[in-house]
Amino acid sequence: MSDNSSTSSVTRLAKRFKAKPSSSRRLGLRQQLLLQLFMFTIAASVMYPLLWVISLSFDPRNILRPTELRLIPPGATLENYRQVLIQPTPNPVSWPELAFNSFCLSIGTAIASVVVGVFAAYAFSRLRFAGRQALMISVLTVLMLPAIATLPALFVLLNKVQMSIGETQFNLRNSLWGVGLAVLSILLPFAIWNLKGYLDTIPKDLEEAALIDGCTRNQAFFRVTLPLAVPALAVTGFLGFMSTWSEFAISWQFLTNPKNFTLTMALYNMVGQYAGNTSWAKFSAMAILVALPVSVVYLYLQKYIVSGLAIGGVKG
Amino acid sequence: MAVTESIFQFVARRKPWRKKINPYLYLIPAFLVMGVITFYPMGFQLWMSFTNYGIQNLRFDAPLPDWVGLANYIRILTTNLGLSNFDFWRILGFNLFWTFSNVIIHIALGIVIAVALNTEGLWFKKIYRAIYILPIVIPQIIVANVFRNMFDPDYGAINQGLALIGGLFGLSPDVFHIRWIDQIAYPISGVPLTLSYFALLITNIWLGWPFMTIVATGALQSIPHELYEAADIDGASGSQKFWRITLPLIRPAMVPAAVYGIVVTFNLFTLIYFLSGGGPIRRTEILLTAAFRLVNEQRLYGIAAAFCAYIFFVLLGLTLLTNYITRATESYEA
């Protein structure tokens, strides 16, 4: 007992000694101000585009292009948001319809990739079997490939799946289902690899204890590992959701009916060559309305996501 | 008796068989799905790359395209596609230069800001942290679109902001009528980089450094204070401490982050397609934007398939190279 207390008093003493040099290393005022200037410049450069879009989105003057910089436009209004919600592009679709398409596509592919992927991730993380290495390399190879690298074949193949039910022609390529399949082909390897990375960090001892207590392998998976992996499933699912939410190339290539368009496609219609007479105030309101929902969730989950990228994503 | 015995034997024999098959049961769902929507299309695409697949073959009852052998591959390499300014080698070269010029700046800036942010006694640390995370959080496609408008020569916030700052020094706003996106002439004579490259670079620096800062911050915080104290006692200067303690100790975290950055930047389709569209005259085209335009604009599906096969090999090479670098640095560490 007495031995214990003496060591703790030693550490306390050591801590007090340590505190001294660190306080002597305190920043001088000049250094502090210089650093503040540096940090503030960086912060300003980060905020500049954001403030520009935000202030533009509240602009009341119904003009096509801003001719000057204004942090707070006089008589700020939500009119631009109202117009965007009703009809962002010349196409006769409203924002809620576009958002519904984007949301269904994103949530569907995210859930499908996680549900299908977690089993394979578990097998790669825990089980030993012939051909493990080869199968893992096949997943990694696909993971390496960006969506566009398989776009020609997916476009051509999904285009072959056509049916006519009575009057209505159904073309898998020209539907959100087709886009979903194409997106899933990208998300699934990512989900497998990311989840494998997470599962590797869950201690094996827990499962071994369950096996000794008489669980089968499958029970150990469903009752022990899977519940522990729920946060990982949520983060992986969200990353998939986010990448589909901001997906553009596939949907732009596949879809032709404005009723099926996604938010990012509508946004593209409001910039650059297509934006002839879309006011930038409306564009800004649209950009914010597309970014805000996912950004807020990302901000909330950010801690888990970055550590997850360090564990799972980077290895690929 | 004999029956139950044989059942027992059967079960006993059955068990290891089940154990062997079990891992594959876990793999079936994923590989079934990937087989249909990934591996089969990849094989199909390989076949496509040897044909003259075009719009005429798109209909489901259309005849099969003609087999052209290696013609597509050769035409791409010899710049014989009949597309103006489409040069595979230049695009590949730009893509590699784009990747490494970006990642080097991201890492350098990321580390510098992380070190500054971790200075003891810095005011407003939390506010800075909250602001610095924003470029990661906002979807890239939004950033690309917003910057597209910001780089507008007449109404964009970049030129207007520059004119505002220039006004303080008595420069007329006309000086800052910079045509960021579509000026073809090189801003620095002798350096074959268009202004749109610099616009892309600025945007991607805005996007890229915070991730590196986060990774570097995590690594910095795990460096024990004692090392710096020991260095202080030995009379080390600030820069000596940075080069001899900080940098070697955050390197294990920075190398995988750099690999991640290289792969992401190499494939940065969204930013380039939206900001410059690969223009002017394809000077900022990367492999992926070129491939997408082969499908989306030129509708040359066979050639696009061959082009994607090249992308596959380039990415394979890049992945192996980065893996080699990672492993080489790891062994150095050990």
Image (spheres, rainbow, N blue to C red):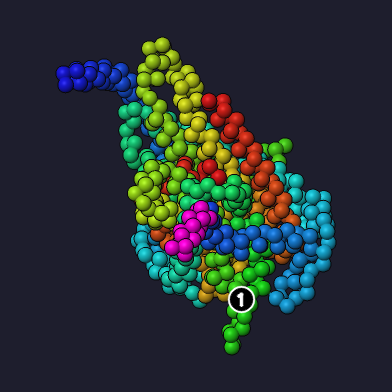
Disc 1 marks a residue whose amino acid type is Asn
Total marks in image:
1
Looking at the image, the residue that sits furthest to the front is B1
Q: Main secondary structure of the magenta part?
A: helix
Q: Nearer the viewer, residue A147 or A48?
A: A147
Image spot of residue A21 (x, y percent): 30, 17
Residue A55, visible in the rendered structure: no
Chain letter of the residue beneath label 1 in the structure image: A
Q: Quadrant of the N terminus of chain A?
A: top left
**Label 1 element class:** strand
Magenta range is: B1-19
Judged left or right of residue A306, residue B205 is right
Image spot of residue A178 (x, y percent): 57, 69
Judged left or right of residue A93, residue A301 is left
Image spot of residue A69 (x, y percent): 45, 51
Please determine whether, in this image, residue A85 is positioned above or below residue A138: below
The reply to whether the magenta stretch includes residue B3 is yes
Quarter of the view holding residue B219: top left
Please determine whether, in this image, residue A102 is positioned above or below residue B334: below
Q: Nearer the viewer, residue B108 or A274?
A: B108
Judged left or right of residue A34, residue B55 is right
Q: Nearer the viewer, residue A142 or B172?
A: A142
Residue at which label 1 appears: A171
Name which residue lies at 39% across and 49% down: A211
Q: Quadrant of the C terminus of chain A?
A: top right
Name which residue lies at 51% across and 34% down: B254
Looking at the image, the residue that sits furthest to the bottom is A166
Looking at the image, the residue that sits furthest to the left is A2
